[in-house]
Image (cartoon, coloured by chain):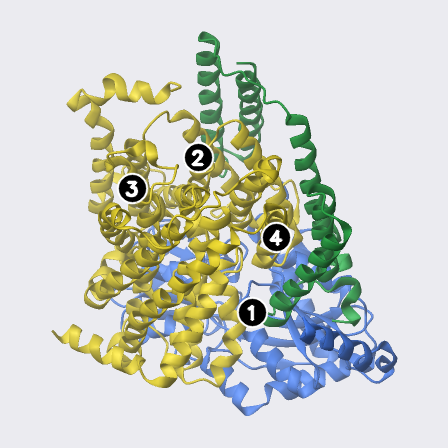
Amino acid sequence: MKLEMIIVFLAVFGLSPALYGQGFPNKPIELVVSSSPGGGIDLIFRLLAEELAKTLKVQVNVVNQPAGAGAIAAEKVAGARKDGYTLLGSLLGQVATMSVANPKAPANLVRDFQPIAILHGYAAVIMLGRADAEFKNLKDVVSQAQKKPGDLIVAVGPVGTSLTLEVELLKRAAKIDITSLPFAGSAQAMTNLLGGHVNFAMASDVAAQPHIKAGKLIGLAVDVESAVLPDVPTFAKQGYPQVNLLASIAFLAPKGLPDPTVKILADAIGKTVEEPKLKENLKTRGYNIDLRTSAADLNKLIKEEIDKYSRFTPEDLGWKSQ
Amino acid sequence: MKREIIICSFWLLLSFYLSIESYRLGLSTANRPGPGLFPFIAAIAIGLIAVFRLVSSLRKSSPDDNFEPGIASETRLVLYVIAGMTAYAFLLDLLGFLFCTFLLVAFYLRVIAARRWPATLSFAAAVALASHFFFDVLLKAEMPRGLLSWLI
Amino acid sequence: MDTLHSLALGILTAASPLNLLYGFAGVLLGTLIGVLPGLGPAGAIALLLPLALHAPPLAYLIMLFGITYGAQYGGSTTSILVNIPGEASSVITCLDGYAMARQGRAGPALGIAAFGSFIGGTVALVGVAFLAPALAELGLRFGPPEYAALLLFGLTALVYLAHGPMDKALLMALFGSLLASVGLDPVTGQPRFTFDILVLRDGVGLTPVVIGLFGVSEVLVNLQAHAGEIFQKKIKGLLPTLQDWKDSAMPITRGTVLGFLVGAIPGLNVVIATFAAYAVEKKISKHPEKFGRGAIEGVAAPETANNAASCSGWIPLLSLGLPTGSVTSLIFGALMIHGLAPGPLFIKNSPDIFWGLLGSMAIGNAMLLILNLPLIGLWIRVLQVPYYFLFPLIILFSIIGAYTAAGNTGDVVIVIIFGVAGYLMKKFAYEPAPMVLGLVIGPLLETAIRRSLIMSKGHVTIFFQRPIAAFFMGAALLMLLSPLLTRRRLGHDIIEKLEEP
């Protein structure tokens, strides 16, 4: 308890509000991440936050708020003080989805947020087949599906994720009928493909890599060039540029953040991803580092993201209201 | 017996409401079970069991109809505990973990356990500081800081 | 012999001072978060992720593994002491463990839980060493129809094994499965029973429900009696007696086997292993009426089963590279950081890591036993704290546990609701355990059946055409029909089950 008292004293006299007047940032930054600790995009944000703290010389605390498919996290940041000390770390698609599909959503990507930085196409989604099956590329898949509409089964992810929506886009673009079987995520989808219960599976490239190396599975197509599987051609290269829900992650701040603060944060994030050790680490984990921070780029990306998801119904996106 | 009728009516009402709700969710889509089918079956089954229990309790007049004495004072204590928890849940983000914990423990000790003020305050303060140290400092569990955010 | 040799080498690797240190840190932290309700291994591992860049790979992984199985050890502590399951897999331990504590036998209960965990974990480890590749291949053969058939078989077995009237238990299980359907429908993505409340989209979490149902409701019931005795003050022994050991030997053996098998099938919850182990013990016990009133078998079997299951749960990850849950996904991520992508070739390409990890688990289990036994003396002193000081702490830990699980006050509200529900259930003599089972199995069964029917375009025959599925469906039907064949059960047993006692 004594230690506690000392800490309290130090806090009162060492960090009193009088010192807060000096330039940004001078106190810990809260990064609200819209996934559970260790799940989904939490890892990449934690790695970035650790390095960002060194660049900015203040603590960057990751706070996880996975509830409501990211809606709660978005709501929290959208309503926070516009001082740059509360940021949202989220999948851009997640915020775009709720803005497009749910007019009642508590936060809207365009209306409520000031983008700071976007890691464009940060990870690839791959369509997998079995190495011992007759499908070697997208063309084989499409021609088989045309012969037997609805007979081929593809294991996809939860409703509203790019694992699922990209199959919908492929079906529309190629005018084919494949049965989508939803699972909880990449691992479950691949398990069912390996067990021979489905014909194809959608997964993240990193999770799929060891199975391709072991010669059990083959990559049929990826949505964005993969850092770990550079040989697999994209959907676009195989004639389906419409299948393009590239997953991007974004640092977002409440709208109305002063320009100098935006610039400080964006520059710091830019510097962070260039740090050699972090860069190497992100690469081995299969993350693409295509960072955009200029205002023109950010606005264009956000507009594109909104357009991409506007092609779907709220049901497809998992935002049908009850 | 009267008790059994009340409980069974509760289950019946719940079954009735949930089966309507799940019916509205859709029992089947294109020859396959829809989102409402399994909840519908479960809700109907609950209703059937409730009817079964109701009928069998009506048939034999049960002797176990004892209303415990002193239930009123127990209900009062239960309400206090629940009120404390509810207040904690709603004030947590505003007042912060440290302060809320102090208030909750002090409230319980003073009002429910009827301890004297010195014991109440010192124990509550000790618990609040210890749990703050343990969860925030040691485990970095990111409890809300609330009002005292400038301090801790 | 090759396997034994490799395992011995692995133990040697894991016994290097650095690895020992990391291993000890892991199991210590694991025990700690296991004791704290709500705070699970996933959160702790996530906190330690930044360390991954600086620590040597094997030592770091040894620590992460230590956290996960350490948490299984710690999970039973609060179940036994204050009726709050530290982890969901310790729910069933509450039934008899807490009853034992109230009789002054918290020491033996904690002791048998620690020994059972040790034996279950260690034996399962040997099983993993010998059988991992074969079991992994078997696991792959379980597609949606096989899961559906297996779960139906399991449910039939539970009904078959149950004693006494079934109708209330069935009611609770059905209610639990309805509760589990709150949130987005996993198949169509349509919201069910969410009332347009955002936090309900993710469904009702298992953690806040069990904290409310077990921990908070127990406090509410005890309030009136707080002047009197909740716990018998006289402590009867710190460790299990010889009789306790005799009673627990077979339950521990059976719990190990059952837990190992359930854990090896990806996607089945550890909770299922504990319920199954408990049900089996209750059925074959000579004194089933003691279950729920402080039978030591009711602590030994499920606590053994959950450790065995969490050990064999590594099989899909280590031999195939398929993470099956949130914790295994995290470990997958940790392996990735070091460029050790686990996959079908993992054991062949990184034998030092694989066997080193197995070796560390053997050492870690022993460390946990040594760590936990002296703690028993400390824990049972907790029960001697006057209840008016203890109950605010129990409530506080319940709230913190629910809050830290997802960082959301919505979960605290769920704890309150189910605390009151649990209180009413106690007053009206309804058991909460079947509800937890419904909450766990309901959604697994539903999604398995619906996925199967999507695969078969709506034809039910899919459950009978595939060999494994057909086998389990056959076994379930046989069990349902067996009373007719033996003519013994249907006559009085089944009808008796449906009547009030």
What secondary structure is found at the residue carrying circle 1? helix
State which chain disc 2 sits on: C
For the residues beneath circles 4 and 3, the answer to whether they share a chain is yes
Q: Residues within 10 Å of mark 3 (few under 14, many from 20)?
A: many
What secondary structure is found at the residue carrying circle 3? helix
Marks 2 & 4, CB-CB < 8 Å contact: no
Measure the alpha-carbon separation of dots 2 and 4: 30 Å
Closer to the observer: label 2 or label 3?
2
In this rendered view, identify the residue nearer to me: A26 or B81: B81
Image quadrant in which the C terminus of chain C is located: top left
Query: Which residue does the numbered mark 2 point to in the structure image?
Result: C173
Q: Could one spot residue C278 in this view of the protein?
A: yes
Query: Which residue does the numbered mark 4 point to in the structure image?
Result: C393
Residue drawn at x 61%, y 42% as measured from the top left: C194
What secondary structure is found at the residue carrying circle 2? helix
Name which of mark 2 and mark 4 comes first in the sequence: 2
What secondary structure is found at the residue carrying circle 4? helix
- Chain letter matching colour yellow: C
How many tags in the picture?
A: 4
Q: Residues within 10 Å of mark 2 (few under 14, many from 20)?
A: many
Chain A as rendered: colour: blue
Mark carried by residue A42: 1
State which chain disc 1 sits on: A
Amino acid type at mark 3: Ala
